[in-house]
Amino acid sequence: MSNLPELYACVCAKEFPVQALLRLRPDIRSQACVVLEGEPPQQTVCSLNSRARFLGAAQGMSLVEVETLPPLKILARARKQEEATRSALLECAGTFSPRVEDRSTDNAFIAVIDIAGTDKLFGTPDKLAAILLTRVRSLGILAVTAVSSNFHAAICLAKGLSGKSRIQIVADGRQRDALDRLSLAVLDLSAAHKETFELWGIDHLGMLANLPEKELASRLGQEGRRLRQLARGEAPHLFQPVEPAFALEERIELDTPVELLDSLMFVAGVMLEQLIFRAEARLVALRSVTISLSLEGDATHIRPVRSALPSNDRHLWLKLLHLDLEAHPPQAPILSLTLTAEPGSTSKVQLGLFSPQLPEPGRLDITLARIAKIVGEGNVGRAVLRDTHHPEGFRIERFVVPSDEPKEPPVTSTSAVLRALRPAENVHLTLTSHGPERFRFRQENYVVERAFGPWAARGEWWNSGTWGREQWDLVARCDNGNVLYGCLIRDVMLNRWQMVGLYD
């Protein structure tokens, strides 16, 4: 058990639905915006920013009432986008302490962080609060922070903070004085209790804290006693931390269907900035990025993009996504966009003093993507042999840079390399009962010294088919003394001999 005194920091982002929508929309952040929820025509305002409130908008207004005000930007509520933003904020809070409790409401993000003993990492509580708000602001969210030794007092103080003062630090034992002037709205009262306190003329926490405990409990039961403890900053709490999974994902719901790729890339660029910021906070890089597009007609278009090395270069990922979508465009207008990234290590490659300079990995990825757009995605990469005797028995795989060095040195062996001749060249050959004896190739006469074969060179032994080609590997000497190491193929059906490759 730890003997450290309790200390909690509560971060509160008010009007969370509108903030979650605007964090990835820098083009409309400066406008007056309201968020509507519900089914038409019964839509009502559930969240709004300060500019919309200045023009007269308020929560609960109907769409008809909103249209009577000066022009406002009307947005539809996006629950999935709010969930993605909430996960990002919880992940941010988890970088300060592993003990984080989510106390969010329908209209606000609220997280309480147990910061007891973190002074040696982040400094005094006011410094920690400033760093916390800076990181939250980098995620595109405006929030306030209150620090108190009482869990519930920190929540109430954060809810009561205005935009002018975004940080409040309350010393131990001064919770009641700090809560005294706060409205009862910070307690999230039920409708019945709210009506009761209005009849009694109680409108702030100080008045509730001064009520006699026994008389209040006799009228409101144990709930009345609990509310009095909250008002006095004395309510106990059993901390229930959450363990959010580290998932690099950003999502945005588009107002209107998008068909132009350039417009989509503008939105994707903002989302990539957020993914990179979150990855850098965890000291990792982006290994791959998957873009998921929700299309009209309930269709989905998913394209994964991978770089040679993990990177946090926004321009690199944006260019790779752009080239991939140009080569594989969606077949319908886009309704929503989701970016999911896989984290990887931020390892560096150090060259020797006299080592040749290698191409920059980012430029190589873009060059390969451009080539794949021209010749086809399956025609760019490295050749890998198949388990077959077929003369074209290889496949193309994507270039992959190994992330870890092998623990043991690889076993190397010396072997001949076959240089294929395309097209194969005809030869005039003299054949005996033991195999090829003489042949003429490229205007030169050769005498076969050693011949190996024949091997069936078309098909696989486990399949039933016609073996229409025979392969011979041979060593031959020319009249001038030059030695040739070659691969001959005999077409059994046409009785034709061809030189298909030379061994180096």
Image: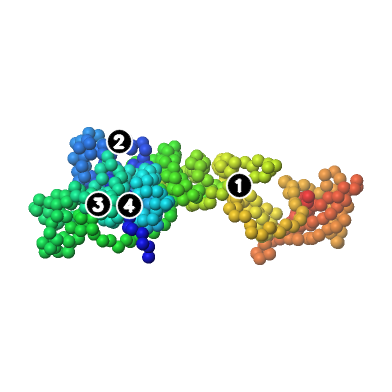
Gap in Å between the C-alphas at discs 4 and 1?
Answer: 41 Å
Residue situated in front as seen by the camera: 339 or 242 = 242
Label of residue 221 in the image: none
Per the image, the residue denoted by label 4 is 9
Look at the image and name its color scheme.
rainbow
Residue 383 lies left or right of residue 55; in this view the side is right
Per the image, the residue denoted by label 3 is 174
Per the image, the residue denoted by label 1 is 349
Q: Residues within 10 Å of mark 1 (few under 14, many from 20)?
A: few
**Secondary structure at numbered mark 1:** loop
The answer to the question of whether label 3 and label 2 lie on touching residues, with beta carbons closer than 8 A, is no
Residue 87, x across and y down, in percent: 37, 52
Q: Earlier in the sequence, mark 4 or mark 1?
A: 4
The answer to the question of whether label 4 and label 1 lie on touching residues, with beta carbons closer than 8 A, is no
Q: Which residue is found at the position 90% from the left and 48% from the top?
A: 481
Q: Which residue is found at the position 29% from the left and 46% from the top?
A: 168
Residue 366 placement: quadrant: top right
Q: Is residue 314 above or below residue 503?
A: above
Residue situated in front as seen by the camera: 61 or 134 = 134
Q: Nearer the viewer, mark 2 or mark 1?
A: 1
**Secondary structure at numbered mark 2:** loop
